[in-house]
Image (spheres, rainbow, N blue to C red):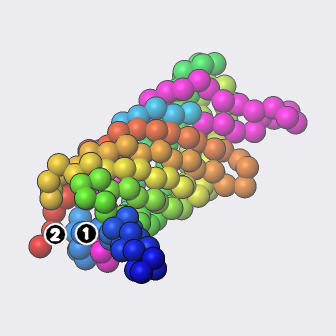
Amino acid sequence: MKSLAWCALLLLVAPRVAAASEGESALSGWLGGGTFVLPGEEEDETIAPTAGGVGLVSYERGFSEALSWRVELSGGLYGGGGLSWSGAAAGGLVYRFDVLKYVPYALIELGVSYVGGGPVPEPVLDPVVQLGGGLDFLLGRSRSWGLEARVASFAGDTTTVSLGARYTLRWGYF
């Protein structure tokens, strides 16, 4: 009897797979704050501006109920040591869980980052692996807003960190 009760409890608390469908598309706009860090010219020296503003546009297309591919472009402006900037382009996978109208998700992407200005002596172009996650709040089948955090780095060179809010429009879910 105890094992039956445990099974029932697990079924009640286990996350359900997202109700996304194959061919569903989404376009998101994202605004938030962030910063970057990169190695300096001297040993044990790092270059890091104070926080700044980051903007992002992404497109997603579902290829299963829980998985979609995603491409994005982002840019940021930062203060501290002069005006510095960053830009990135990335693509990868998003895995979504569905818990009623709140949808947590994780993402992994590969891309490039380009940073310069301010304390950066010369612009730096680096490959990055981007890891992130967030929580979307569904406003209906075609719209949502959410919060997302992300870290992008590769082999200890340029690292970017950002946290922001996003608004998403969806179509093609029939």
Q: Which of 135 and 171 is in front in this view?
A: 135
Question: Can residue 91 be seen?
Answer: no
| Image: magenta residue range | 36-65
The answer to which image quadrant residue 105 occupies is bottom left
Q: Please check the rendered image and state whether residue 47 is part of the magenta-colored stretch, yes or no.
A: yes
Q: Which residue sits furthest front?
A: 1
Q: Position of residue 12 (x, y in %)?
A: 33, 67
Q: How far apart are marks 1 and 2 (CA)?
A: 7 Å
The answer to which image quadrant residue 74 occupies is top left
Q: Do the residues labelled 1 and 2 touch (CB within 8 Å)?
A: yes
Residue 173: image tag: 2
Secondary element at image label 2: loop
Question: Can residue 141 be seen?
Answer: yes
Q: In this view, does 60 lie to the left or right of 82?
A: left
Q: In this view, does 2 lie to the left or right of 139?
A: right
Q: Which of 70 and 113 is in front in this view?
A: 70
Q: Where is residue 82 in the image (x, y as percent from the top left)?
A: 59, 19
Identify the residue under disc 1: 20
Whichever of callouts 1 and 2 sits on the residue coming sooner in the sequence is: 1
Q: Nearer the viewer, residue 27 or 98?
A: 98
